[in-house]
Image (cartoon, rainbow, N blue to C red):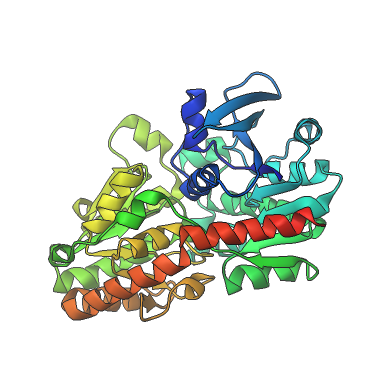
Amino acid sequence: MRILWLCNVIPPVIADQLNIETTVKEGWVDASLRRMLSDEEHDITLGVCMPSASIDVPYVADKVTVSGKDVDAFRFLEKTETPWIYDKTLENVFSNILREFKPDVIHIFGTEYPHALACVRACENREKILVGIQGVMSACAKAFCGGLDDNIINASTFRDMIKHDNIAMQQHKFEIRAGFEREILTKVSHVTGRTQFDKEETLKINKNLHYHHMNETLRPEFYDGKWNSESLKDHKIFVSQADYPLKGFHVLLDAMPGILEHFPDTVIYVAGNSITGYTTLKEKIKIGTYGKYLLDKMKKYDIVDKVKVTGRLDALKMRDRYENSSVYICTSFIENSPNSLGEAMLCATPSIVPKTGGIPSVASDKEVMFFETGNSNDLADKVISLFSDSTKAGELSDNSRIRARQTHDKDINYSRLMEIYSELCQV
């Protein structure tokens, strides 16, 4: 089988061979790639297409060898920091790559970036395309503002005015990307998904899609993780992302006064870069409306020193954070199946999550504690309940690990992927 992958980032295993830097985002793609490269059973010739802003030609074709196997690595020129801008020249790039590689199957990872649409438009035989649903952009666009008031949504800081990028504008950019997604799904025949939510949402767009259920394999470091139950006493909350309103970090901040009444030593740790910095002149210039809104809320509740931003974490540092946190919390207004929740469950970290999107497909109330989406009072009650009940925390910990090891079983998921590839090769 000649399989061509279209990824949103350069997988680290390939970046290492090309001696270039990449990001820690979408680590599950790298995990799947490593599993494929270890496959001794199937006859696979693999090509991987990846965006790059560092090349000065439309695309570069390299041959790299990983684990003794050759991989055709195609880097195409794209500015991924502006994913709402469609570059029509990419259609010609993908036409050339498809002619050169001659794939039996084209596996597109996600609908979030316009390069996915360019590839679909360039492909003559779209029956060979398999689109993997990661997020659901149409649902994300609707929920983007996270229940904020219009006066916040339409406000602008200096940074927002210069970049034309306040919350309302950011939502509009998501809507543009949702339009790309709709066209993709109307032009292809095959998608993979993993939740009832993404199945229903994609079939709303195209009822004729052939939906293939397939769970994701996560980064290998998390399969060895094990939560430290002693950390429950430290009242440390871990949140994996808080960059924009959809992720609902403001809901957790609103819950903090109630939590602190019962557990005054509670601290929040947030992965990623700080969007609330306001000390230096540079930070004051760069802060956006949502970051300023969060900062004002933290000052109002006098909890600035209760929020610790960790910076970007690699897999081992993320695992350490899960293992040594009292609880992992997701506050998103919509999610398909957040990989951060999968990682937390693999590490057996007790989790409190909203009952939204695809989350109920990957966890039940035996494995996680649910709160009403957007309801800070309910979230506070759930945190207080968990901190007060070590037996309940232990049960969630044990059950979540069992469930996650089933959902993210490397061999079962890889076998399923091969089944889907084989089916498409026969089309």
Quarter of the rendering containing residue 225:
bottom left
Question: What is the residue that sits farthest to the right in this orientation?
Answer: 124
Please give the name of the residue rendered at 32% of the width and 49% of the height, measured from the top-left corner: 318
Query: From this viewpoint, is residue 181 visible?
Result: no
- Report the residue that reaches farthest toward the front: 41
Q: Percent from the top left, x then y, of residue 374?
A: 43, 71
Of residues 344 and 88, which is closer to you in this image?
A: 344
- Asked if one can make out residue 319 in the rendered structure from this viewpoint, the answer is yes
Query: Is residue 427 shown left or right of residue 27?
Result: right
Q: Quadrant of the N terminus?
A: top right
Q: Residue at x 53, y 44 (%)?
A: 33
Camera-nearest residue between 159 and 355: 355
Q: Position of residue 4 (x, y in %)?
A: 69, 42
The quarter of the displayed image where residue 133 is located: bottom right
Indicate the quadrant where residue 385 lies: bottom left
* 36 horizontally vs 212: left or right: left
> Vertical placement of 50 versus 130: above or below?
above
Residue shown at 35% from the left, 46% from the top? 315
Query: Which residue is rendered at x = 48% and y = 56% of the image?
Result: 217
Residue 346: give x, y in percent of width and height: 35, 62
Q: Where is residue 89 in the image (x, y as percent from the top left)?
A: 78, 31
- Is residue 113 found left or right of 238 in the rendered image? right
Q: Quadrant of the C terminus?
A: bottom right
Residue placed furthest toward the top = 56
